[in-house]
Each structure stands twice: as structure tokens, then as C-alpha cells.
Image (spheres, helix red, strand yellow):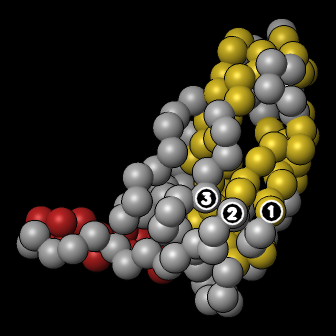
Amino acid sequence: MVKVLIALLAVLASVAGLPALAQIAAPPGAEAYFIEPADGATVKSPFTVKFGLKGFGIAPALVDWPDTGHFHLLIDREAIPPGSLIPNEPTAIDYAGGQTEAQVTLPPGTHTLILQIGDHQHIPHLPAIVSKKITITVSP
């Protein structure tokens, strides 16, 4: 419900010409990365994705602690631009509970994965904390 209200406020703000959603500053050197799978890996679905984070902390969504956020796994899409709400949909999975690994099921084929950190309201930090995009192949 909170995400729906935040999204509605963002849409209303953009229509009214108001500034983008407020962003929280990220400390210098904060970095998201994949522990596994490795870039170029071939996996069988479902597979485990382990998230890594350096220079920053993890907190569940709606918990507003300094220098913390939570992971979003972006599948076959680009990172969410600053000032936007990170959606919770099949190609942008929200780990709002503060999870640092997940079982992921994808259809066979080549896929790209990106980790992006969202603040307590699912908004990217400034600058955004985004992993390097990796490519994996899911075998049949």
C-alpha cells in the first residue's frame, strides 16, 4: 500500500511539474555486486543469486537508518534512473525484507542481471548504488 501511495505521489508530482522524488545521498565508494552467479555463468533454473554490498548497510524497506537500503534485482532491463521509484514487478524484484540472497527462476536463454539499492521508500540513492550488469545463460 505504501509503495502504491509513493508511486501515485511521484506521478502527480511529474504531471504537476514538481521536482522528482527526494533522494538520499550515498556515501562515496558504496558498491553493489554479485557474489554469484558469475558473469558469463550457465545455470539451471531455479538458481541462487547472492548479493554483495560494500561501504553501505542493509535494512528492510520502510526502515530509515543512515547509510542503509535494500536490494532490487533487475532482470533484462536497465537500472532505474535517479528520482524514480524502483518498481516491484517481475523484471524488478524487490527484496524489501533485507534479503542478501534469493532463489530465482528464469526461462531458458540468455539474461542480464543488475542489482540496485533502494532506500527505505524504494528510491535509488544519489549517486545510485548499482552493480555491474552481468549476463547469464539459463540452460533448458
Q: Position of residue 75 (x, y in %)?
A: 62, 36
Question: What's the residue type where badge 2 is placed?
Answer: Gly
Residue 35: quadrant of the picture: top right
The reply to whether residue 62 is visible in this rendering is yes
Label 1: which secondary element = strand
Residue 8: quadrant of the picture: bottom left
In the rendered picture of this protein, how many numbered marks are placed on residues? 3
Query: Is residue 135 found left or right of 90 in the rendered image?
Result: right
The reply to whether residue 97 is visible in this rendering is no
Q: Which residue is mark 3?
A: 129
Q: CA distance from mark 2 to mark 1?
A: 8 Å
Q: CA distance from mark 1 to mark 3?
A: 10 Å
Q: Which residue is mark 2?
A: 29
Categorize mark 1 by other alpha carbons within 10 Å: few (<14), some (14-19), many (20+): few
Q: Earlier in the sequence, mark 1 or mark 3?
A: 1
Tag 1–tag 3 contact (CB < 8 Å) = no
Q: Position of residue 14 (x, y in %)?
A: 18, 66
Q: In terms of depth relative to the viewer, which is nearer, 79 or 46?
A: 79
- The image shows residue 81, relative to residue 91, as above or below, that is below
- The image shows residue 31, relative to residue 1, as above or below, that is above
**Which residue is depicted at the point 52% across and 34% down?**
77
**Which residue is depicted at the point 87% across and 16% down?**
42
Q: Which residue is mark 1?
A: 54
Label 2: which secondary element = loop
Q: Earlier in the sequence, mark 3 or mark 2?
A: 2
